[in-house]
Image (cartoon, rainbow, N blue to C red):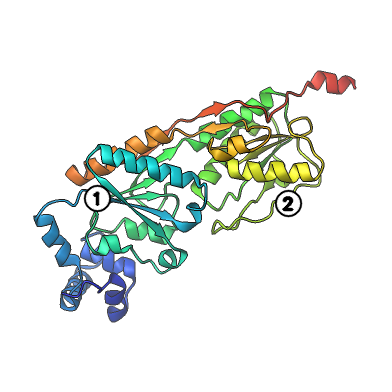
Amino acid sequence: MNRNVTMQDIADRLGVSKVTVSKALNNKEGVGEELRLKIKKTAEEMGYRYNSCAKSVKYGLTYNIGVISPEKFTGTNSFYISFYKMISKELDRRGYSAILHTLSHEEEASLRLPRLYYECKADGLIILGQVGTRYAELLGSIDIPVVFLDFYDKHSEIDSVISDNFHAAYELTNYLIENGHREIAYIGNINATSSIQDRYLGYLKSLLENRITPNPDYVISDRLDDGTLTDIVLPERMPTAFVCNCDMVAYKIVNKLKQSGWRIPEDVSVVGFDDDIYATLTIPNLTTVQVNVAEMTSLAVNMIINKIRSNKSYGRIPVRGRIIIRDSVRTINRNQEAME
């Protein structure tokens, strides 16, 4: 049997999409019965791994879990590298091993699953960090359990564990308002990831509840839609505070402000999100949201193992974080400012 035959090979031969092939081979909805049978027959003729994996299951589980993380999230000092280490430890504690696969831009764009899937090396997959909608749809059609970790996708029924980004950013913005701030900007491309968008919506809810009219000039992009970081352009009228979608971006904006002569927090307050290494590298140290990575990890690992055993469905599970107050926010006395 030729183990190198892929779903894309079958799709190319039949002139259909890769997702259609995957759905047909795994008996998912959305493919007509005649086409389903044709795809299965072609797969068998080409020697696709579809049958070889069934053979491996007959002899038992591998006790490996694939952890797939897009390469844009796995740079030096990445929040997700720390996340992966915790996942690996938790899986080891439960008798499983983690196999990390960094998903390249090319793999994601061409809808190519990692070799550990084609070679039946994992019983399930944890997807760490956001992938595109088409790739999420592909993952939803494969024949082993999948759990999303730290993102979700509206087009997919895959179970997910996420940080409660909305309420955390809402509470963080409330904290700034309680300290006298009303000109508050948000830094993050709200189209780039579900996390950045949810944090923006929490920020927005706080403004609206406090009768603060949102200023479109105070929504500032930090990256392209594909996640590539860009230079942050400061608004002409400086806000008194910035809510940043992550600590790394907060670190960048603090340094940029200092280079322009602004003092933190005397002139401008800055808050972050994640409580990762950048929170304490930043001077002054950042007020931020501490993501409960330990609980998210435990839930995701428990979820994937239970899905392997019983194919149980969980839906979307949010995990609450908490605000860590440090030195990057000043209190504005509005009455005193009015008198002056």
In the picture as drawn, the residue positioned furthest to the right comes out as 340
Name the foreground residue: 149 vs 99: 99
Q: Residue at x 50, y 37 (%)?
A: 165
Q: Position of residue 27 (x, y in %)?
A: 20, 61
**What kind of residue is marked 1?**
Asn
Residue found farthest to the left = 58
Tell whether 248 sits left or right of 88: right
User: Which of label 2 and label 1 is nearer to you?
Assistant: 1
* Residue 289 picture quarter: top right
Whether 250 is drawn above or below 156: the answer is: above
Residue 310 position by quadrant: top left
The number of numbered discs placed on residues in the rendered structure image is 2
Residue at position x 69%, y 44% in the image: 253
> In the rendered view, would you say 182 is above or below 109?
above
Q: Is residue 11 left or right of residue 49?
A: right
Q: Is residue 64 or residue 168 the one in the foreground?
A: 64
Is residue 22 visible in the rendered image? The answer is: yes
Alpha-carbon span between mark 2 and mark 1: 45 Å
Image quadrant in which the C terminus is located? top right
- Give me the residue at 37% from left, 51% from top: 127
Q: Which residue is mark 1?
A: 64
Q: Is residue 330 left or right of residue 325?
A: right
Q: Residue at x 17, y 43 (%)?
A: 309
Q: Secondary structure at mark 1?
A: strand
Mark 1 surroundings: few (<14), some (14-19) or many (≥20) residues within 10 A: many
Residue 233: give its label. 2
The numbered mark, 2 or 1, whose residue comes first in the sequence reads 1
Q: Is residue 34 left or right of residue 300?
A: left
Residue situated in front as seen by the camera: 214 or 288: 288
Q: Find residue 168 and name its label.
A: none
